Amino acid sequence: MENASYSFSTQPYPPRQRFEVWREEVNAIFDVKIGDPESTAFNYRLTTCYLGSLLMGCGVWEGTEKPVHYDVKRSAQRVRRDGLDHYYICLGLSHSINGSAGQAPLVASDSQIYVLDLARQLDCIITAGDTIILTVPRDLLAAQIGNKDIHGLVLRGGLSDLLADHMRALRARSASFKSDEIPYIQQATLAMVAAAITPSIPNLKSAETEIDRTLLNRARKLIERHLQNPDLTPTFICRHIGISRAGLYRLFEQESGVAAYIQRRRLDKIRAILQGDSSVQHRTSGLAFQFGFKSESHFSRTFKKAFGYSPKEARDYLIASHPLDSAGQASVHTGFSLRTMLDQMTPG
């Protein structure tokens, strides 16, 4: 069974009613107020799902006007009345907050993660925008962070960036999570949160697997974007994702090393180009230099070792599979092609 999600949008309501309707939905946590001129511009969508005992909310600003500002509060009376004992961890993708959390100032701009203790008072102004929010029962983090005061904490640094990547990945993939995966997803998420909030050795050790997975995905995406960059080296990757060379080599151990991975992705890309369009003729020497090979002979040997046939044979295969008709045009192949599917596969 896939992980169920629930959505609410103000879009179906008349503009003058949207903020009031939305306030009824979020009023379980905050007291919210807005000025009359800005209320008519309010338009917001929220999707929520459970990740075990965690609640993830993904907010999207749908207003056509510039984002509006509104007041959010948790008074002492409200804290006593609702008895919520959770941490509220918000990644503001295009959302910001300014005010006070308890007695401390709280200022977080977009792309930052801030933490609220819902058992404490809050008085802030929010600029509406896209968010990813994790609501975490206090006891699930008690062992890792103890009694540390994190109300109003704004996370910074590399571990905060990794947690933000993890939260974005949760948002992107939550609809496909299976029920038997949820306990592990909850465990990984809690480990990442604890490591970002309290980067102790035990917390970092607990989060190590998820941190490695996030760093590896980040490195793969960077490599994919720079396959034609002659400066694509381990040093380049380390500098851009903030990791040591030893750490990078450890991430790519199962790929036979980072250099081997880069070379294989370049070869895959060249093969896809050679076999991608019969109407365009590509010089193999030009492609070789374009993707960082120093000589055509070295490229040809490497290509044949990887795929079992030469670059010329790869191109000839394409031409043979699309014979010209009597008018000199390639015949159209409309059936299923397993080879094409395999050629288009890229690492996740």
Image: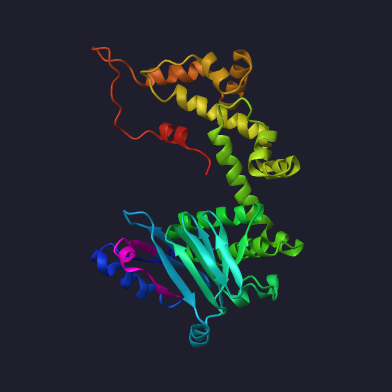
316, 207: nearer the viewer: 207
Residue 42 is covered by the magenta coloring: yes
Q: Residue at x 72, y 60 (%)?
A: 205
- Name the quadrant containing residue 305: top right
Q: Tell me the magenta residue range.
A: 30-46
Quadrant housing residue 146: bottom right
Left or right, 277 with respect to 166, comes to left
- Asked whether the viewer can see residue 182, the reply is no
Q: Is residue 199 magenta?
A: no
Residue drawn at x 64%, y 72% is 141
- Image quadrant occupied by the N terminus: bottom left
Instruction: Relative to 69, say whether 331 is above or below.
Output: above
Residue 242 visible in the picture: yes
User: Would you say 272 lies left or right of 233 here?
Assistant: left
Q: Position of residue 296 (x, y in %)?
A: 59, 14
Residue at 33%, 54% in the rendered image: 65
Q: Is residue 304 left or right of residue 61?
A: right
Q: Residue 148's x, y, as percent?
A: 69, 73
- Residue 158 image offset from top left, x and y in percent: 66, 52
Where residue 28 appears, x then y in whole percent? Answer: 43, 78
Q: Nearer the viewer, residue 50 or 76?
A: 76
